[in-house]
Image: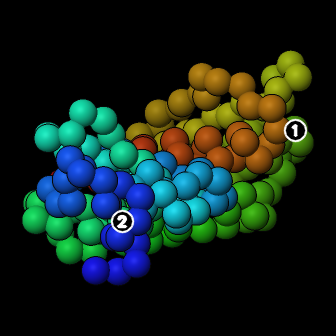
Amino acid sequence: MSSHTKHGRWSEPGVPHKGWRCVDFIDLGRPSETCGMCEGQEIRYVHVMEHADYPERIRAGCVCAENMEADTVAAPGAAKDRERRAKSLEARRRRWVERVWRVSRRGNPFLNVDHFNVTLFRKQNAWSGLIEDRKSGQKIFAKRRYVDQNSAKLAAFDAVAILKDRRENSDS
Ligand SMILES: [Zn+2]
């Protein structure tokens, strides 16, 4: 038993120690919450855990989540994997924003990537965007407006990720 699994709800009667399932995973952006299981660890990544024999969900940190997941279908190290994936996604999003975006003759930032042409443009007092799939010719306009260029870039990153997934699935 690590020091984690002696504190907080780990020692509370009626709280199952094993067999929890992770039903959601949230990146708070910075450590700003206390692990709901050991009630000691300050956490940034929240593993939302659920158990059939417990009435409420517990928002746990990585170490506790890992222990709580024992004896379930979750692969060993699943909690750490979730955090690794979240960190790598964050790094990719950061690189995407920091990339050198070219500027069109109309003054709009654009990026050509994986056969997608991503263009951002101002609309009223906000930013919007257009993604063109240069393989299919499909054009997708952003449905939302963004307060600044970086938010629009991040939204474009997420949209391109979804479109790439779709393209890969339809190719196979
Ligand atoms: Zn904990």
Is the residue marked by circle 1 packed among few (<14), some (14-19), or many (20+) residues within 10 Å?
A: few
Q: Residue at x 14, y 40 (%)?
A: 52
Identify the residue position indicated by label 2 in the image.
Answer: 64
Q: Where does the C terminus fall, quadrant-wise? A: bottom left
Q: Amino acid at mark 1?
A: Arg
In this rendered view, identify the residue nearer to me: 3 or 28.
3
Identify the residue position indicated by label 1 in the image.
Answer: 106
Residue 82 in picture, x, y percent from top left: 38, 63
**Which quadrant would residue 29 be assigned to in this image?**
bottom right
**Image vertical order of residue 138 relative to residue 154, above or below:** above
Q: Residue at x 60, y 27 (%)?
A: 141
Residue 121 in picture, x, y percent from top left: 79, 34
Residue 30 in picture, x, y percent from top left: 66, 58
**Horizontally, is 147 left or right of 22 in the view?**
right
Q: Does residue 81 appear in the picture of this structure?
A: no
Q: Residue at x 11, y 60 (%)?
A: 72
In this rendered view, identify the residue nearer to me: 126 or 39.
39
**Image vertical order of residue 4 relative to residue 47, above or below:** below
In this rendered view, identify the residue nearer to me: 91 or 121.
91
Mark positioned earlier in the residue sequence (2 or 1): 2
